[in-house]
Amino acid sequence: MSDNRLSVGDTAPDFTAPTDTGTFSLADLRGRKVILYFYPAAMTPGCTTEACDFRDSLDALNAAGYDVVGISKDSPAKLAQFREKEGLTFTLVSDEDLAIQNLYAAWGMKKLYGKEVEGSIRSTVVVDEDGKVALAQYNVKATGHVAKLRRDLKLG
């Protein structure tokens, strides 16, 4: 568990991990802007809302030069089901051992229904073309997050 939240200007930790379609490596996207969003579990109501918002905004995000990558502790098989069910067209990364979430401080203590529990902290980290953190948001809300992110990135 990590409390070392990333800040603007930090170097984004590189990682390579399985996806539902193969392998993803952040280093392969150097030179592009990348939105890494961390979510607790595929096919749950909030995570589905957030994923569908990213799906529906993908053309605008891609046009502005951003790639979107969703990261959760779900297995590649579950991610494949999620992709199929919701028509998701961006990369879904499996982080079953929580290594990536720990690197990005997206795993830790959080409030869930009024109780402190350990789990995935819904977070978004935007990485610039040089591999630096351009934006880091923690404890974001599933509903309305993508619209807020687009405003924060000045994409309208």
Image (cartoon, helix red, strand yellow):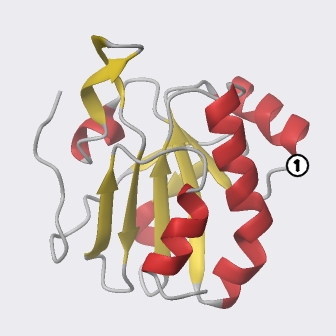
Give the quarter of the figure containing the C terminus. bottom right
128 or 46, which is in the foreground?
46
Graded by Cα atoms within 10 Å as few (under 14), some (14 to 19) or many (20 or more), the crowding at tag 1 reads few
Residue 50 position in % (x across, y down)? 64, 47
Q: Which residue is mark 1?
A: 87
- Most distant residue in the left direction: 4
- Most distant residue in the front direction: 114
Residue 48 position in % (x across, y down)? 71, 37
Residue 142 left/right relative to 59: left
Residue 119 left/right relative to 44: left
Give the quarter of the figure containing the N terminus. top left
The quadrant where residue 63 appears: bottom right
Against 53, residue 115 (above or below) is above
The quadrant where residue 18 appears: top right
Against 112, residue 131 (above or below) is below
Instruction: Note whether residue 50 is visible.
Output: yes
Against 106, residue 57 (above or below) is below
Q: Amino acid at mark 1?
A: Gly
Residue at position x 77%, y 78% in the image: 59
Residue 131 left/right relative to 64: left
107 or 109, which is in the foreground?
109
Residue at position x 24%, y 27% in the image: 108
Instruction: Note whether residue 90 is visible.
Output: no
Residue at position x 28%, y 24% in the image: 110
Residue at position x 82%, y 29% in the image: 81
Q: Secondary structure at mark 1?
A: loop
How many numbered marks does the figure carry? Answer: 1
